[in-house]
Each structure stands twice: as structure tokens, then as C-alpha cells.
Image (cartoon, helix red, strand yellow):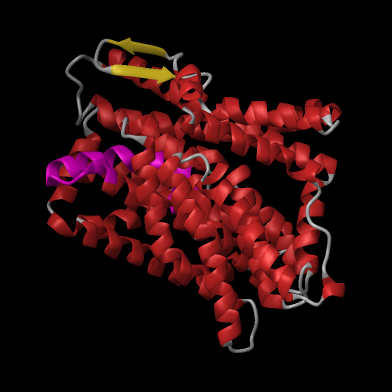
């Protein structure tokens, strides 16, 4: 009975978003209101409701601030690059490398989509890639599906690792351990997703030559992604993997084209901010003296009742993003674009902040009121098969909230509690959940609606969902089987 009651706030969110098609804020607020009522009645805290709500609010505000410190510079970077024309030049150059439709789909939906996911996240890849694919002759439905499939393998590390860093903030687990296991799961499943994307990109049967290019594209991104996750952590697997993978793939593709078909490479100034961010992250994670200097300052707080939080202002990815953006703008003579880019980013930040605050408050309330413990006890009844099911919880979370970050915030503590009850390593289940949250983006109604709007595709979002749902379940099942096999 306790588990059923504990699940009702999540059920309210699911009904509100998936059936009634209400926003994440409204649905989350309804779920939060119900959770407060349950905390007052069925799950009475021993120290009283006032200390509970005060501590929950403090933790939620702290975590929202640390996450927004990543999202703000990521959005500002995108707006800066958009204002300078760099985004269009990068897209156009990729499209000009070959006239073969399936290779164009790999370049735009896979490499460009992953690159924008790593740099900005939050719906940017689909919004950018889908219109370009339409411009190349793809029908709107197919363009949106290709864009959704292409960026999904990098969502776990989008916006410089925001989804994984949210898991770290909630669970206290080691970022690098979560990153490596999550990247390994994607490395196993992503080739299947890429083959499906390439198959969908044209009506003609897949040839051995195109399968070879597809395998090469998968390896070009996934190998550096796993290496960066193992060596650095969650900040660079998608952004760095996409940069390295695209450079390798483009170099080989250019070499295979007739000499007169070769096109100029990216201009340095267009890639300068991303390169500087890459160098800053590598330096602060891999060079011991630099790491000690940047990580040495920690701001922390605690309250009675076990409420606490900490923040490393110099070591935080958001600070590195800001620094890379500033140095890139100054070094390329484009600093005049910074105020406008920051202004637009701030305006875009408000609805994100509200949605995060609602979801995080619900998450922390369910943790401290004991609702997560009740859910974990019920999940533990499934027994050793739970690792297979863990990614599907991630899919559910992204479907409900439209965000891998929000899914991780909602359910990471639940996965940790379930692991403790089953005697399993919590990092494995948290990684499996994050993996599922990433692929859940391709069925999240918010993402489908937003992507469809960029190509004027109104009223046919259900067609897009029908084409992505099966692949989402297959991808989650591959990750679940892999996680189950490891444990």
C-alpha cells in the first residue's frame, strides 16, 4: 500500500504530460502538491513538516543553481555561435561534403546532432538538424525522426555532462564511475540505433559499402567517447567524442571523394570556443597541479536532519564553459556578440529553471519523506532481474518530463535505494538509468513537438512517436540486458 501511495505523484505527472498534454511545470506542480499532502498524512516525518519542507527547499534550490550554472553558459554559447553565423557555416560545410543522402544523414543527424548535444543540449540538436535535413530534401516526418535518433546516444553527456552531473548531485556517487559505465552501455547499443537511422535515411536497400561507412561513423564517435568518459568524466564524452569523431570521419570522407569535390574545412574561429572548452576540461581533470588548484575551493552547507549541499566554483563545468566562451569571443574578435547572446540565454533560462525547481523539489521531498524507500522496497521484490528493468525507468522519466536531466533527478535516488536493498552496486543501476533517460528523449512528447515545430510539422507528432517508440524499447532492452549481464 505504501509503495502504491508513493507512486501516485509520479502517476499524476505521467497522466498530466502524456495523456492530458500539460506542461512539465503544471504536471510537476500537481505531483508536488500531492506529494506534500502525502507527506502530511501517510508519510509523516519524525521531525515535523516545517523542518522537512525547509530542508527540501534548501537542497532543491542549491541543486537547481548548480545545474543552471551549466545550462546558462551552454545556451549563451549556442546563441553566440548562432549570432556569429558559425552554426550555419558548420552545418553547410558538413552537408557539402557529399551528395549521397545516407552519408549526409550521418554527417548532419549523427555527428552534427551529437556535437550540438554535447555543447548545448536541451532540444538544440533536433531544432537545428531537422530543418537542415528538410532543406536537403527529406520529408518533415523523416527529418524529425532522423534528428531524434541521431543525437540520442550522446544525451547522457549533453550540455557538458549535465544529466550525469545531476545524478552525482543527487546521489553523491563518483562522476567518473557513472560516466564510464553509461558510456559503455551506449557503446554497446548505439551501433544498432545508427544502423536503423541510416536505413531510414533512404528507401534503397543498405549496401555493404554503406554499412561499412555506418560502422566507421559509430566507431569514430563511440571509441573516443568511452575513452574520454574513462579518463576525464562526464563533461566531454559527447562534445569531445563528436569533435574527434567528426574530424576523423570527415578526413576519410574527403580523401575518398574526387579531388575537385573537396570542400574547405571548418574555419578556426568557428570552432575556437569548443576547442578552448575541451582544453580547459582536459587540463582541470588530467593535469594534477591544475586539478588541485581548481578543485581546492569548495563551498558547502548543512542543516539539521541530514540536509546538505556543496559547490566547487572553479572546478564546476559551468565555470569552464563561461571561461571558454569568453576567451573564444575575445580571441576571435567577436566579443561584441556576448551581451546579446547572454541576454537571449537568460530569457530562455527562466522556464527551464521553473521546471527544474518543481521536479527537484518533488524529488527531494520524496527522498526525505520516505516515499523513495517505499518504492525501492517494492522494486526489490522483483529480485535480481531489476538491472534489466532499470533503463526502462529512465525512459519513463524522460517520457514524463521531456528531459534526461529531470528523469535523472526524479529517479536516481530511487535506483540507489533499490540497489542497496538488492545488495547491488548502486553505480551500475544509476548508469543504467541514465542510459535509459537518454534514449527516452526520442519518445518524449516535448522533444517531438519542439522538433516538429521547426519544420512546420503540426498535427503529425503521433506519426513521429510511432516510428521512434519501437527503437526506443529495443535500445533500452539492449542496455538492460547488458547491465543484467554485468551484475
* Location of the C terminus (image quadrant): bottom left
Q: Tell me, yes or no, whether the highlighted magenta stretch contains residue 422.
A: yes
Q: Tell me, yes or no, whether the highlighted magenta stretch contains residue 239.
A: no
Name above or below for residue 370 compared with residue 444.
above
Res. 418 visible in picture:
yes
Q: Position of residue 239 (x, y in %)?
A: 58, 47
Asked where in the image residue 436 lies, by quadrant, the reply is bottom left
Q: Position of residue 236 (x, y in %)?
A: 53, 43
> Start and end of the magenta stretch?
398-427
Name above or below for residue 402 compared with residue 318.
below
Residue sitting nearer the eye, 253 or 423: 253
Res. 33 visible in picture:
no
- Horizontal side of 296 relative to 422 (left or right) equals right
Residue sitting nearer the eye, 47 or 329: 329
Asked where in the image residue 30 lies, by quadrant, the reply is top left
Q: Position of residue 113 (x, y in %)?
A: 63, 56
Amino acid at each position: 500500500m505504501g509503495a502504491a501511495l508513493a507512486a501516485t505523484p509520479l502517476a499524476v505527472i505521467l497522466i498530466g504530460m502524456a495523456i492530458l498534454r500539460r506542461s512539465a511545470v503544471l504536471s510537476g506542480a500537481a505531483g508536488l502538491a500531492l506529494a506534500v499532502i502525502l507527506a502530511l498524512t501517510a508519510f509523516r516525518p519524525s521531525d515535523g513538516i516545517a523542518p522537512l519542507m525547509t530542508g527540501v527547499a534548501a537542497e532543491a534550490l542549491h541543486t537547481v543553481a548548480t545545474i543552471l550554472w551549466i545550462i546558462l553558459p551552454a545556451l549563451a554559447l549556442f546563441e553566440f555561435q548562432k549570432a556569429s553565423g558559425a552554426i550555419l557555416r558548420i552545418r553547410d560545410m558538413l552537408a557539402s561534403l557529399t551528395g549521397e543522402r545516407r552519408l549526409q544523414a550521418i554527417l548532419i543527424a549523427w555527428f552534427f546532432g551529437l556535437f550540438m548535444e554535447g555543447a548545448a543540449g536541451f532540444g538544440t540538436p533536433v531544432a537545428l538538424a531537422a530543418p537542415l535535413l528538410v532543406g536537403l530534401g527529406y520529408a518533415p516526418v523523416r527529418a524529425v525522426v532522423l534528428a531524434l535518433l541521431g543525437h540520442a546516444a550522446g544525451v547522457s553527456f549533453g550540455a557538458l555532462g549535465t544529466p550525469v552531473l545531476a545524478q552525482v548531485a543527487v546521489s553523491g556517487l563518483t562522476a567518473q564511475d557513472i560516466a564510464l559505465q553509461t558510456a559503455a552501455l551506449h557503446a554497446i547499443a548505439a551501433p544498432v540505433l545508427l544502423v536503423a537511422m541510416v536505413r531510414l535515411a533512404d528507401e534503397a536497400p543498405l549496401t555493404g559499402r554503406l554499412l561499412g561507412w555506418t560502422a566507421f561513423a559509430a566507431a569514430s564517435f563511440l571509441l573516443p567517447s568511452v575513452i574520454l568518459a574513462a579518463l576525464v568524466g562526464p563533461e566531454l564524452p559527447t562534445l569531445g567524442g563528436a569533435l574527434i569523431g567528426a574530424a576523423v570521419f570527415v578526413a576519410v570522407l574527403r580523401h575518398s571523394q574526387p579531388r575537385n569535390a573537396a570542400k574547405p574545412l571548418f574555419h578556426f574561429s568557428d570552432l575556437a570556443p569548443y576547442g578552448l572548452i575541451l582544453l580547459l576540461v582536459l587540463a582541470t581533470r588530467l593535469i594534477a597541479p591544475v586539478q588541485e588548484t581548481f578543485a581546492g575551493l569548495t563551498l558547502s552547507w548543512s542543516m539539521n536532519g541530514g540536509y546538505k549541499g556543496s559547490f566547487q566554483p572553479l572546478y564546476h563545468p559551468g565555470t569552464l564553459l563561461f571561461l571558454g566562451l569568453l576567451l573564444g569571443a575575445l580571441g576571435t574578435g567577436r566579443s561584441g556578440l556576448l551581451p546579446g547572446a547572454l541576454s537571449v540565454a537568460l530569457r530562455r533560462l527562466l522556464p527551464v529553471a521553473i521546471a527544474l525547481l518543481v521536479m527537484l523539489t518533488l524529488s527531494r521531498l520524496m527522498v526525505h519523506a520516505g516515499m523513495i524507500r517505499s518504492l525501492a522496497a517494492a522494486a526489490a521484490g522483483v529480485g535480481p532481474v531489476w538491472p534489466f528493468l532499470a533503463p526502462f525507468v529512465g525512459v519513463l522519466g524522460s517520457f514524463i518530463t521531456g528531459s534526461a536531466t529531470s528523469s535523472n533527478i526524479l529517479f536516481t535516488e530511487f535506483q540507489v535505494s533499490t540497489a542497496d536493498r538488492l545488495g547491488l552496486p548502486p553505480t551500475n543501476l544509476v548508469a543504467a538509468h541514465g542510459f535509459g533517460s537518454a534514449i527516452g528523449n526520442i519518445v518524449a512528447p516535448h522533444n517531438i513537438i519542439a522538433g516538429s515545430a521547426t519544420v512546420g510539422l503540426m498535427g503529425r507528432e503521433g506519426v513521429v512517436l510511432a516510428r521512434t517508440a519501437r527503437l526506443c524499447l529495443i535500445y533500452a532492452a539492449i542496455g538492460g540486458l547488458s547491465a543484467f549481464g554485468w551484475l
